[in-house]
Structure formats: structure tokens, C-alpha cells
Amino acid sequence: MGKKVKKKVEPPPKDVFDPLLIESKTAATVVLMLSSPEEEVLAKACDALYKFASKGDENKVTLLGLGAVEHLYKLISHEDPIVRRNAIMVFGIMASNHDVRKLLRELDVTNSLISQLTPEEDVVIHEFATLCLAHMAVEYTSKVQIFEQGGLEPLIRLLGSPDPDVKKNSVECIYLLVQDFQSRAAVRALNVISPLLELLKSEYPVIQLLALKTLEVISKDRETRIILGESKGLDCLLKILETNEFSDLHVEALAVLANCLEDVHTLQLIHQTGGLKKLLSFVGVSTVPSIQKNAAKAITRAAYDSENRKILNQEEVEKCLINLLEIDNDGVKVAASQAISAMCENLASKRAFGLQGIPQLVQLLSSDNEEVKEAAVTALANLTAASPSNASAVAEAEGIEPLVNTLNSQRDGAIANAATVLTNLAMQQPFRVNIQRCGIMSVLEEPLRSTNSQVQSKAAFAVATFGCDADARTELRNAGGLGPLVELLRSKNEEVRRNACWAVMVCASDELTAFELCRLGALDILEEINLSTGCKNNFSEAALEKLLDNNLSQKYSQMGYLSSSNIITDGFYDCGQIKPGVKFLSLEELSMQKLTDHRAIIFINAKPQEDLTVEKEAQDSFYEQTILSPSISRKSNREKASSSMASPVEEKQELSGQWCSLSKSSTSEKGLRKGKGKKEEEKSKEVTQITSKVQDEINLENSHWLPPPDLILLDYINDASKTILPLMTTREQVMALAQFVADKMGGPIERDKLHDFSWELHISEIEFELKCNIVPIGKVKKGTFYHRALLFKVIADRIGIGCSLVRGKYNRAWNEVKLVDASPQGIAGLLLPPQEYIVDLMFEPGYLIKQGSAEADQYKHI
């Protein structure tokens, strides 16, 4: 037997430590352990930190402050799989904190995380790496990093992972990434549709929901919708809608279908397979407001295409939408109204809605919800556009009053569309009258002041529509609406400016409104507009002309032309050609000016005798009661009695002169100082002071200024009516009137003695006599071209002879008439076009000069 050998036991190395169990209750100690070289310590430290971070956001912030993120960043690429896994788990939990994500972006952790998504890697690493990426993808900068570092491809691949958490995190990250259009195009190229459709079969609702949300985002692109249709994705969506168990997914499924319905090809595919009918039936039986609302939105988006509208009309989508208007949910009502607006582009749909849907929409105008009101009135605006039958349906549904009330809405869209509907209704006379009775012009005053260009445009258009009625114009004027309307002429918006010009043109149809528009500066603004090639429009030119047609004095002063349709009436005055930019003064303002050596203002006022008597008595009464003392009143009566002995012409001249004197406070004393004795002279001084004060008060109160009468002109008109009107032809009347005017204005003048015709001195004498720059035309006995042409036009207008008045240079003016020449000899009954002639009033009164001839040019420019 051999001897047993005893083995020698060697002592352990001096640098090897026996296993030691370390327990720590402080996070700081554990974070320090992340610097350990031992894998086991690192793994346990990471595991401890994972549990600590999972307890709440405060712990994550604590670890961030202790520098744990920087240590963990080094460990996510550790060679030991357990250390790597545990470190990534901590990142996955901590990345839910905003400050942690900020540091992770700075460390560019996404690249390291993406590198962990390889197929051979542990499923737990996949789970928490995708979780961390999903947290980070919430912010745009991280989305860009993930996209640029190629994160989409491995994420899409992991949609097929057997682990549901990996699927959930991956699809959530993809959903966040595809919010950016670059990622949408990239996932389409990476064939993401099929994996997403597979996820719809998942047993986990959260995965199905995220898959649908992702499909909803990427199906906004047409190319994706085509792939979805080819992949039988539409069938999957419809099956979800048909399955009651998936009711929590119905809203998202409808959102995807809404995108698909935008595409004609896709809608046709759904229609051919019966899917559209199923969809509308589903909406009809559903009682979930969110589903009903999204279905209506889907129809709205589809209805933007004309071909889609035809398909939807074939499936009688109108009934579905009308039923949705009855749902007791404001969101559904808004969506249904918007869908009706979109479908109105189809004429068949517009007729269908007109028969059934208009009463419901009118009821919605009384809703307390401003959004509902706006959506309903927008639908009515589209329904009544170019549809008299639908407009009638709105009126029959008693919609006029609520529409007028909607003009006071808080939403600009509601106001603009209410104005549109009312304008559409106004195309029919009975409805326009009813709308005016509701006081629309008063209500429009506020929308005209809006800062919204759409509201401004529609309000101005409504004014143009309703302003054709005189009472409506008066209502707008009294409501203060002309001021904001004139301001809209300055708008930089072309449509607003055009509609404002149109409204001004319509409102200028009566003299009072035209005068107020001019006072507010409309003429000046329109002139500026018409001088600009970029701003002027057809309505701006027409508005200017219309304003001037109701203010002929200014028209003649600015344009130097009055047509045969511009009838000169009492109150007209010729103050000469006004320079551009110079304010045009009213006759009352001109009467307040002191006597000057400037050109006299020729005034027209041929009042009938009875009108003059009433005005004179009222005027005398005013001065006697408020200004003149009893003694002066008696003096005026004595003067009236003594003047009765004078000739009729002298009486008329004296009356005119006295009127001018009384009309100017600066000359009141001169008009009254005809009495005798010191007492009356003192009284005159007192009266002058009182008169001045009273006149100032009158001006402050905007009292009506009475123009001086011209009884001589009245006699001219009466004489012309008796002697000229009975003549057989217009030609004879024109010639006779020319001779009549010339006789009253100094007779014919020889051409070579024109410079000796001292008409200027004569006019100056009249001005001095009247102490006034305003000269009634009847007092002019020596008149030159422009006096005679004006008198000819005045009398011609009164007795019905059509003629124009044209101002030339160097005190020239002339009248143009259109006359039909006799038929050529031997051709009886031939109707020739009228020829235009200039009437000679100076040299050979009654001689007709053919327009365009050398003789006519000579007459104009001599």
C-alpha cells in the first residue's frame, strides 16, 4: 500500500477580497457604485437605481442631481449584457422627466439606444430602449436626431416583436416621429402599413389605438392612402366599425377613414365594395357624439372634391347630415353644418338640403353657442347662394329676424355670413322689404366698423344691396353708418375697397346722403383712388361720378362738364375751376368770405313766387323777432312800402341786394344804415353786435342757410317757356333760346371787338353793389362765354331741351346739343343718327357749329 500524499493548500492572493454584501439606504452611495470596475456591483447598483427611479418623479430629479445620468450613459454600451440591460432600464424609466430628457439630448444618447435595437439583443433591452426613445420623441429636436440616426427602420422591424411592450413602445415612438412630414415619407418607403394593420389584430387595446393613431397621421398623404387601399386596410377599418367590442376604437378608425375619403380613388373603392353605405348606416345608428362628429368631419373632407360629392349624393348623405342637426350636442351640430356647407357645391345636394335642412339650420341661429351659430349661418350662406328657392325657404322658416340679430354676433365669421345670407334674400323684393323693416341698416353700422376685412367687405356689400331704397339710406345716415363706410374706401384690401365704392355709389342716389358723404370726405378719397392704377376699380369711378351728379356745383368745378342728364337746379353755383387738392367750399362758406377781386361766384336760384313769399316772411320774422329792434322793423316795413312804387326789375334787384346784405354779419350794418338820425345809427350798431352773436349761434347749431332769390332768372324761365316751347322743332328751340340768352347778356359781339366787351367791370359793379362775391345770374347784363353758357343750360334744363355744359380755358364755356339733321333730298323717312353741335351764344347767337370741325375748335380757343 502506498503512502498517502498530503496536498499542499496555497493561501489566497493578497489582492483578492472575500465576497461582501453591501447594503445602502442612500442614493448617493449607489450612484458612487456606478464607478465600480466590477460587473456584479454595477448590475446591482443599476437595479437598485431602477427601483428607486420607479417610485416617482422626485427620485428621478434626485438621481439627475447626483450625476447618475452621466455614469449610466457610459454603461449602456458596457460589454456585460446584464450591466447594459440594467442601465438601459434606468434610462427608460428616467426619460419620462423633462430635465432628464434635456441632458440625454445633450449627451446624444439616441445613437447608443438605436444601436441596441438589433435582432440578437435581449428583449428587455428592446423594451426599455424603445421606451426611452418614445419618451424622447415627444420633443422636436429628439425627433430629428432619431430620424437622422436611422431609428425608423429598427423601430418598424420591432413592430413584429413577440413582446407586447416592445410593440407598444415602438409604435408609440413611430406615432410621435411621423408628426413630421419627413418621417411620414420615410415610413411609407419602409413599408410600415402592413405591420400597423397587423397591430390592429392585437389583443391589447392600447396597441390597437396607437396603430390607428399612426395610420391617421400617415394617411394624410395621398400615396399612403393608395397603399392602405391596396393592402385591404379599408376592410380592416370597416370591420372595426362593425364590431361593437371595438367601440373604444371607433373614433380613431373614423379618423383614418376621413383621410381616405378625401381621395376620389379610395372613396370609389369604398363605394364599390358597399363600405360607404355601411359607414353612413353606422353613423345613423350610433349614439356616441364623438363618432357622429368625426363622421361628419369625414364627410366634410371628402366633399371638397367634386367627384366625391357626386358619390356622396348618390348614397343620400344629405339625410344623414340633416339627422345629425337634431342631435343634442353642439359639436355634432357644428360638424354637420360644416359638412352641409361643403356638400352645397353639389346642386342636387343643395336642393335636397333646401327641402329639408333649412328649418333646422334657422333654429340653430338662436343657439347660445356662438360656434353653432356661425356654422349654421355659414351653411345658410352656401345654401342660398344663387338659389332663390332656398332663399324663399329661409324666409318661410322665419329666418330673417334671427339673421339680422346674428349681425350682432361675437364671431366675425357669423357676422360676415349673416350679411351674405341677407344679401342673397334681398334679391327678391318682398324679402328685401321685410329685412329693411327689421332695421338692417342700423345694425350694419357696427359691422362696418369691424377690423376684420371679411366682415367689412360683406357689410359694405349689404349696404350696396339695401341702399337702393331711400328709407334704407336715411336709416343708415341717421345711424351714423356713412362715416365708417367712407373709412372703408381707404382699405388696403381690394375687395373691401371695391364693395365700399359700390355702396357709396348706391347711397349717393339722393342729394342728402350724397352731401353727407361729401362732407365726410368721400369725394377726396375717391379722387385719390382713381388716380392710382392699382387701387381704382369700376365702382370707384362710378361712385365719384354719382356723388358729383348729386353735387353738380362741385362736379362742374372739378370736372368742367355737365351732361344733358345733369339737370341744374336751384342752389347751383359756379365758382370756377378748382385746383386739385383744394377744398371745395359750400355756398354758405363762400358767403361768409369778405369781398375780393377774385372771380365772382355765379349763383342759380329761380324760386317760384309763392316759395319766395313763404321764405321771405319766415326770414323777416326771424330777423324782426330775434335781431331787429321795433324801430328798425318799422323802418323795414316803410322801405317795403316805398319800394312798391319802383319798377318790377328794380324791386327784384333791391330784394336780392338786401338778402345778400342780411346774409353776412360783416355787412349787416351796411344793410341797415339807410335810416335817418343818430338814434337809429346807434340802434344799428347795437343790432350789428346782436346780429353777429346770433349768427354765430346759428352756425353752431347747423341751422339751414337760405340762398338769395333770383326773381329775374325766374322771369327769364317763364318768358322762355312762353315764347320758345311752342316752337315746332328742337333745332328751332335751340336757336331761339340762344338768341334769347344773348339778348339778356349784352347781345351779339363782333369777333374783333371781343376785347372791348367790358364784362369784368360790370360784374365787379354787381359785387360791390351786393357787398358779396355771390352774384345771382339774373343780375348779369353783360356776360361772356361762361355766363351765357350757364344761363343757356339753366333755361334749357327747365324747358326740356337736352344740352351739356362744357368749361374751356380762358373764360370759355359752351353748350353742346344733339340734333337730327333732315333726311337727304329724295330719301324720305330716312332716320339719321343725331349730330352734335356747339351753340354760338357770342358772335352769331343761334348759329350751330358742328362738333369736331375747325370752326368748333376756333370757337373754343379764340
Image (cartoon, rainbow, N blue to C red):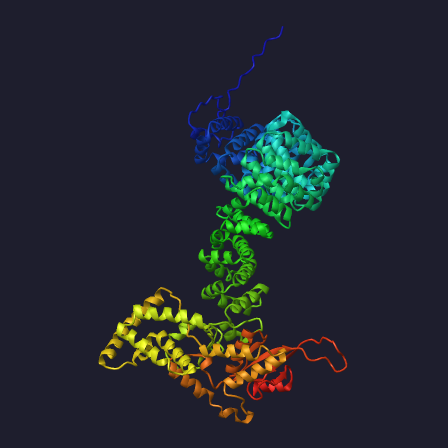
Which residue is situated farthest in the bottom direction here? 752
Looking at the picture, tell me which residue is in the foreground, 856 or 8: 856
> In which quarter of the view is residue 772 placed?
bottom left
- Image vertical order of residue 234 relative to residue 581, above or below: above
> In which quarter of the view is residue 225 placed?
top right
Which residue is situated farthest in the left direction here? 679
Please say whether residue 304 is visible from this viewpoint: yes
Residue 512, horizontal then vertical, whole percent:
47, 64
Residue 554, horizontal then vertical, whole percent:
49, 72
Which residue is located at x 49 percent, y 21 percent? 19
Looking at the picture, tell me which residue is in the foreground, 767 or 462: 767
Which residue is located at x 58 percent, y 75 percent? 801
Which residue is situated farthest in the right direction here? 826
Q: Quadrant of the N terminus?
A: top right
> In which quarter of the view is residue 302 placed?
top right
Please say whether residue 812 is visible from this viewpoint: no
Looking at the picture, tell me which residue is in the foreground, 450 or 623: 623
Which residue is located at x 67 percent, y 28 percent? 242
